Image (cartoon, rainbow, N blue to C red):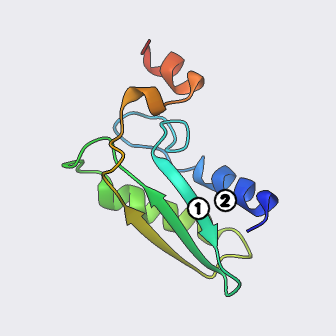
Amino acid sequence: MEKEMEESMFGALENVIDPELGIDIVNLGLVYGVNLDEDGNAGVEMTLTSMGCPMGPQIVDGVKQALAELPEVQDTEVNIVWNPPWDKDKMSRYAKIALGVS
């Protein structure tokens, strides 16, 4: 996948806000990777802030909707993984400042 397409996908995912924290999933460090095959099938490997996150289904739906906005994407598969586990060190500087985390 071209770097430009990867950046477009990450840019689209910045529009998906974690409803509990009010910060997008990219800056929270929840998205571990994206890919797009030649048929327009997108794949997203990501995690959630906790295994019992009640907003998981809503976030997954948001990922699919955000990537559907890209003309190159025909379908999206979201793979939720728990390894490596998410922690606050994965957050961007922006997210840490917004949430008051050091």
**Mark 1 crowdedness (10 Å alpha carbons): few <14, some 14-19, many ≥20:** some
Q: Amino acid at mark 1?
A: Val
Of badges 1 and 2, the one in the foreground is 1
Report the residue at 49% width, 30% height from top: 91
Q: Is residue 76 above or below residue 21?
A: below
Is residue 53 left or right of 43 when viewed as pictured?
Answer: left
Q: Residue furthest left?
A: 52
Q: Amino acid at mark 2?
A: Met
Q: Position of residue 20 (x, y in %)?
A: 34, 38
Q: Of the numbered discs in the image, which one, if any, rests on residue 9?
A: 2
Residue topped by disc 1: 34
Is the C-beta separation of discs 1 and 2 under 8 Å? Answer: yes
Measured from the top left, where is residue 101 in percent x and y?
Answer: 42, 15
Q: The N terminus lies in which quarter of the figure?
A: bottom right
Rendering quarter of residue 78 = bottom left
Q: Is residue 9 above or below residue 73?
A: above
The residue positioned 34% from the left and 57% from the top of the image is 81
Measured from the top left, where is residue 54 in percent x and y? 23, 50
* SS for callout 2: helix
Crowding at dot 2, Cα within 10 Å, few <14 / some 14-19 / many 20+, comes out as many
90, above or below 67, in the image = above
Q: Mark 1 or mark 2: which comes first in sequence?
A: 2
Q: Secondary structure at mark 1?
A: strand
Question: Which residue does the image show at 71% across and 84% down from the upper left?
Answer: 38
Seen in the image, is 74 located left or right of residue 16? right
